[in-house]
Amino acid sequence: MNFRFFKKSKYTFFFLITFTIVCLPFYYFLVRTDYKLPIYNPADVNPKLVDKSIRMFTKNHTIADFELTNQNGKTITQKDYEGKIYVADFFFVTCKGICIPMSNNMKELQKKFEKDDDIMFLSHSVIPEMDSVPVLRDYATRKGIIDGKWNVTTGSKKHIYELARKSYFAVLDEGDGGLQDFIHTENFILIDKDKRIRGMYDGTKFENVEKIVKDIELLKEEYE
């Protein structure tokens, strides 16, 4: 009697184990709610961060085409970031303030995604007339920047400042990119494979590194 009960219980036990292994993950897949990072458009962010000419737009915002020069004298365009997730920021080589923790945190992100070809980084100099290619090359070497993974760039000041204000929403003041114009921002901006803004972070705070890592992983899942 006890033996027959044990045999029945054994089969029931194996059935429950099999059900748990096979069915529960499928059930989870059916009922789980997918969380996706927001897509930022001009009307979604602090208006002071957005050029007044585009503040009213509520959809379809993407990073404008750009043409910059990196630490190796190579021309960098959207083509170099096509199909990539990347983090962008604005800096200058001689900065002794916010740029130091920003570069350290970007370097930490580079380390975490060093072997992941889908992830890149893009830094724009806000005093491009001073940050020439040789200056950027020396900076990249000192900071351990990996060529092909992280581009530190110079170029037309007007072009860079327009990108900051009209594409990345990285600046709190207005200007025209002229001689007296100067921007200084701590923002890291997360861009997806479709050139859309998916996250904005204070790049001076080390605790935001893990937040960005998690958000990048979410974006990768979205594209899978």
Image: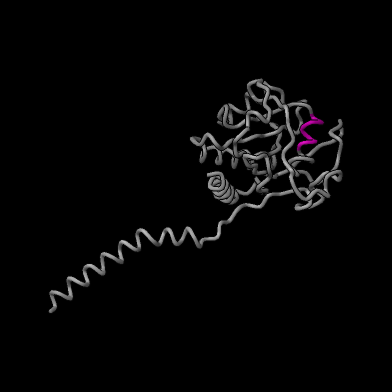
The one nearer the camera, 157 or 132, is 157
Q: Residue at x 67, y 34 (%)?
A: 123
> Does residue 45 appear to the left or right of 141 in the view shown?
right
Q: Residue sitting at 76 percent across and 36 percent down? A: 163
Q: Main secondary structure of the magenta part?
A: helix
Q: Is residue 158 magenta?
A: yes
Position above or below: 26 against 166: below
Image coords of residue 112 (percent x, y): 51, 41
Q: How many marks?
A: 0
For residue 11, what is the image quadrant? bottom left
**Location of residue 100 (image quadrant):** top right
Residue stretch in magenta:
157-163
Q: Indicate whether residue 5 is drawn in magenta.
A: no
Q: Quadrant of the N terminus?
A: bottom left
Percent x, y of residue 117: 52, 34
Q: Front-most of 75 and 202?
A: 75
Colour scheme in the image?
A: one colour
Q: Position of residue 28 (x, y in %)?
A: 46, 61
Q: Find residue 183 and report its horizontal and vertical position in percent.
A: 79, 39
Residue sitting at 79 percent across and 40 percent down?
A: 166
Front-lying residue, 126 or 49: 49
Q: Is residue 57 above or below residue 32?
A: above
